[in-house]
Image: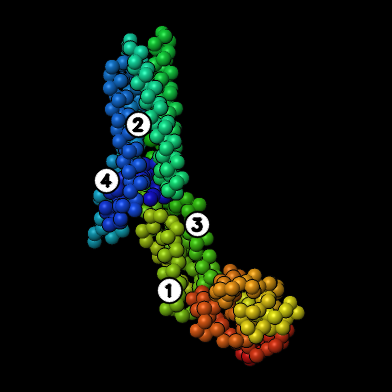
């Protein structure tokens, strides 16, 4: 499934997903419904082009000829994607990052040809001396069918796109629905011609503008990709949110991503809550997997990780009551104290008491509590009991959170120790 962050519109991408599956060695059976609908779409577009060309020859209608060219946009884009899938993923010593941008280069060439075609049709509509000749009324019936086919198939494709959660099918279904407008204009032009109103050239000029608009839709994003412009703001923010959602990440220092063909290259510099290189590497692998699972067409992710160095530490402490008595049992803690200490100023900067939402949980209580506390991103968790070998302990360790045991009985006593004698239990 292709995400709409590349130079070629999402509405064309799924048509060659069968080729993509073969190139990637994926299980085509699992994608069978989407592949089948994609092949239906490509076949319908080819039929529409052929029928429109035949009718334009029979009637001499410039508007029908222009509408046939308009339908060719889908076919051209499919060819561009096939070329990209067959060639662009090949890597070599000279092209270690692949030839993904060939897709965008082909897309730009196609867009320029479409601009030229739109110009010629527009000039013929304005200056041409030929006009649509007489034709049988059955031609109008055929053109009406050309309106109904994309309308109903587009509706079907939109429903299937929602069913399978496929943005590609949804985009292409919308494109079919939009094509209905162009064919309706052609129908109106031919109908006027039948009753003696010279509307064919006007209809052709309008469709020529549609062709130019489609060409612009291919040219601009493809040019951005060739110039290494960043991916869209929405995609970049989605990647950022995935990174910051990891409890081991305290800061995203830098994040950049670019398109290459239909694929995305990501580079990020993050601050993690551990100085252990092995643990930091595991954290970066976990983040990479999360990004690839949620953002399609990620080719490569490069994460630079640095240990955090700061004077402020954020603590989480188990409490038995809101007055500050420290709990003996992690899982039976009624409350938690969250506070931040500035070691330079030797002062508590922030402090809040929160209730334990999983106090009455039957199963997995300790792990649920740990995951709940990790949302507050503490640097250090302080408990009375040992969490070694227990679920909460593993959860905190994986997030790079330090676990300390204390002998203090109250929160005030603990705060005094942390500020004045930080090494004392």
- Dot 3 corresponds to which residue? 238
Quarter of the rendering containing residue 63: top left
User: Which residue shows up at 32% across the image and 33% down it?
Assistant: 44
Determine whether the residue tagged by mark 4 lies in a helix, strand or loop.
Answer: helix
Q: How is the image coloured?
A: rainbow
| Cα–Cα gap, marks 4 and 1 | 37 Å
User: Which residue shows up at 52% across the image and 72% down it?
Assistant: 248
User: Which residue shows up at 43% across the image and 23% down it?
Assistant: 184
Q: Earlier in the sequence, mark 4 or mark 2?
A: 2
Q: Give the crowd class for mark 3: few <14, some 14-19, many >=20 residues within 10 Å.
A: few
Q: Is residue 16 visible?
A: yes
Q: Residue furthest top?
A: 196
Q: Give the crowd class for mark 2: few <14, some 14-19, many >=20 residues within 10 Å.
A: many
Q: Earlier in the sequence, mark 1 or mark 2?
A: 2
| Cα–Cα gap, marks 3 and 4 | 30 Å
Q: Nearer the viewer, residue 336 or 91?
A: 336
Q: Are marks 4 and 1 in contact (CB under 8 Å)?
A: no
- Dot 2 corresponds to which residue? 71
Measured along the vertical axis of the image, is residue 281 above or below residue 127? below
- Dot 1 corresponds to which residue? 282
| Cα–Cα gap, marks 4 and 2 | 20 Å
């Amino acid at each position: 499934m292709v995400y709409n962050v590349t130079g070629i519109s999402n509405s064309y991408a799924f048509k060659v997903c069968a080729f993509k599956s073969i190139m990637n060695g994926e299980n085509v059976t699992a994608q069978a419904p989407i592949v089948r609908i994609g092949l239906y779409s490509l076949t319908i577009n080819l039929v529409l082009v052929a029928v429109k060309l035949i009718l334009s020859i029979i009637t001499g209608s410039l508007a029908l000829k222009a509408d046939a060219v308009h339908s060719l946009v889908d076919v051209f884009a499919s060819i561009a994607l096939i070329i990209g899938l067959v060639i662009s993923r090949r890597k070599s010593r000279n092209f270690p990052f692949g030839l993904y941008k060939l897709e965008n280069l082909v897309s730009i060439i196609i867009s320029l040809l479409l601009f030229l075609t739109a110009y010629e049709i527009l000039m013929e509509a304005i200056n041409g001396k030929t006009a649509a000749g007489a034709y049988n009324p059955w031609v109008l019936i055929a053109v009406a069918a050309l309106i109904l086919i994309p309308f109903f198939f587009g509706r079907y494709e939109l429903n299937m796109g929602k069913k399978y959660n496929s943005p590609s099918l949804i985009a292409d279904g919308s494109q079919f629905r939009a094509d209905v407008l162009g064919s309706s204009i052609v129908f109106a032009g031919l109908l006027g011609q039948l009753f003696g109103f010279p509307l064919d050239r006007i209809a052709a000029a309008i469709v020529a503008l549609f062709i130019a608009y489609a060409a612009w839709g291919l040219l601009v994003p493809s040019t951005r990709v060739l110039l290494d412009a960043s991916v869209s703001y929405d995609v970049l923010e989605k990647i950022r949110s995935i990174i910051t959602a990891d409890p081991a990440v305290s800061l995203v220092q830098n994040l950049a991503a670019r398109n290459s063909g239909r694929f995305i290259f990501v580079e990020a510099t993050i601050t993690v809550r551990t100085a252990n290189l092995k643990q930091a590497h595991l954290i970066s692998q976990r983040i990479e997997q999360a990004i690839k699972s949620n953002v399609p067409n990620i080719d490569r992710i490069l994460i630079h990780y640095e240990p955090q160095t700061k004077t402020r530490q954020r603590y989480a402490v188990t409490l038995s009551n809101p007055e500050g008595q420290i709990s003996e049992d992690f899982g039976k803690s009624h409350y938690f104290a969250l506070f931040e200490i500035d070691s330079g100023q030797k002062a508590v900067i922030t402090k809040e008491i929160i209730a334990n939402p999983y106090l009455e949980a039957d199963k997995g209580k300790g792990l649920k509590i740990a995951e709940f506390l990790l949302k507050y991103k503490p640097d250090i968790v302080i408990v009375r009991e040992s969490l070694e070998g227990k679920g909460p302990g593993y959860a905190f360790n994986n997030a790079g959170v330090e676990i300390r045991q204390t002998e203090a009985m109250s929160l005030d006593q603990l705060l005094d120790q942390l500020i004045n004698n930080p090494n004392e239990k």
